[in-house]
Image: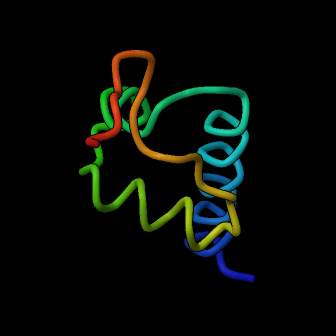
Amino acid sequence: MSEINRSREQILTELRSAYEKGASIRSLVAETGRSYGSVHSMLRESGTRMRSRGGPNHRRAG
């Protein structure tokens, strides 16, 4: 495995771990300097089970 691929795998693992421990995508964006879409895509690529949208102030319409 090349150094570039190993680095990407490490990033995917770190993002997944942080997200699964409760970090939000937006907090990961701020921490890594990557775009929201990039972080979201990387989490999906790593097989992360995504949480439902919204935080403590999120309200469903209806």
Residue 10 location (% of width, % of height): 68, 55
Between 8 and 16, which is closer to the camera in this rendering? 16
Residue 32 location (% of width, % of height): 38, 36
Q: Is residue 43 above or below residue 21?
A: below
Between 4 and 50, which is closer to the camera in this rendering? 50
- Which coloring applies here? rainbow
**Number of numbered discs on residues:** 0
The residue sitting at 67% across, 65% down in the picture is 9
Q: Quadrant of residue 56?
A: top left
The answer to whether residue 35 is left or right of residue 23 is: left
The residue sitting at 55% across, 59% down in the picture is 43
State which quarter of the image contains the C terminus.
top left
Between 37 and 53, which is closer to the camera in this rendering? 53
The answer to whether residue 9 is left or right of residue 23 is: right
Residue 59 location (% of width, % of height): 33, 29
Q: Quadrant of residue 18?
A: top right
Q: Quick one: which residue is furthest to the top in this view?
A: 56
Residue 52 location (% of width, % of height): 52, 47
The answer to whether residue 21 is left or right of residue 61 is: right
Q: Quadrant of residue 61?
A: top left
The residue sitting at 42% across, 58% down in the picture is 40
The answer to whether residue 28 is left or right of residue 61 is: right
State which quarter of the image contains the N terminus.
bottom right
Between 26 and 49, which is closer to the camera in this rendering? 49
Q: Quick one: which residue is furthest to the bottom in this view?
A: 1
Q: Is residue 57 above or below residue 47?
A: above
